[in-house]
Every structure is written in C-alpha cells, then in structure tokens.
Image: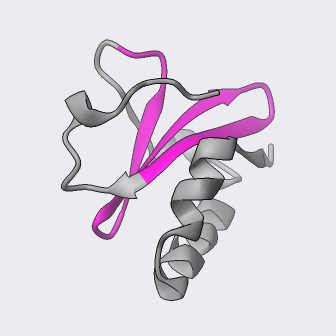
C-alpha cells in the first residue's frame, strides 16, 4: 500500500527555511518510505506520533489509513521539550 504524504502548515514553513539540498533530501526520503513507512520510522515515547531521521534532521509524523501526516521538520539539535506539539 502506498501512502500519501501530507504536510502541515508548520512543516511546510520549517522546510522552506532549510537549504535547498536538505529540502530535496527530505522529500526524496519521504518518497522512498511511502510504500512501507513502518519499516523506517520509530514510535515516539509518550506521544501518538512517529519520528524519522534524515541526516541531521528529524521528521515528526502521524500515520493513518493511507496518509503520512508530516507535522514537524527540524534540525536534530532541537530538544524534544522545545517542540510545542501544536501540529495544526
């Protein structure tokens, strides 16, 4: 089953602030994992979402039905307590 990738407004804003090469790498990775995302992602502890490492960046997402909801994209130096969890 192939999943559709859906970006939150926040994730789009975060992605646009990154260098073009980083953007391309993240998009390419998301395209690759669309077939079997559960093979590549890690369940978040204490949250209903998942995380994916792409180089020095992290992607926070939720998976349901046939959708990958990309909530946040950030440099991995950001501590989890700095993320606001407001994924709308």
- From the image, which quarter does the C terminus lie in? top right
- Does residue 52 appear to the left or right of 88 in the view shown? left
Farthest residue in the bottom direction? 21
Identify the coloring: one colour
Task: Examine the structure image and report whether residue 62 is included in the region drawn in magenta.
Answer: yes
For residue 85, what is the image quadrant?
top left
Q: Nearer the viewer, residue 24 or 85?
A: 85
Q: 80 or 51: nearer the eye?
A: 80
Give the percent coordinates (x, y) of residue 24. 58, 80
State which quadrant residue 10 falls in: top right
* Residue 44, above or below 72: above
Q: Is residue 35 rendered to the left or right of residue 50?
A: right
Main SS category, magenta section: strand
In the rendered image, residue 23, in percent from the top left (x then y), is placed at: 55, 75
Residue 56 falls in image quadrant = bottom left
Lateral position of residue 53 relative to residue 78, left or right: right
Of the 4 image quadrants, the one containing the N terminus is: top right
Position of residue 74 measured from the top left corner of the image (x, y, whole percent): 39, 54
Q: Residue furthest top?
A: 46
Residue lying at 52% horizontally and 77% vertically, measured from the top left: 25
**Vertical side of 56 occupied by 64: above or below:** above
Residue 40 spot, x, y in % from top left:
46, 49
Which residues, given as a range, are shown in magenta? 47-73
Residue drawn 52% across and 57% down? 14
Residue under the image location 78 percent in, 25 percent down:
65
């Amino acid at each position: 089953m192939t999943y559709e990738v859906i970006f939150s407004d926040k994730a789009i804003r975060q992605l646009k602030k990154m260098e073009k090469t980083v953007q391309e790498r993240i998009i390419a990775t998301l395209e690759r994992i669309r077939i079997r995302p559960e093979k590549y992602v890690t369940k978040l502890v204490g949250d209903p979402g998942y995380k994916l490492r792409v180089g020095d960046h992290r992607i926070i997402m939720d998976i349901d039905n046939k959708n990958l909801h990309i909530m946040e994209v950030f440099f991995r130096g950001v501590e989890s307590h700095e993320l606001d969890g407001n994924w709308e």
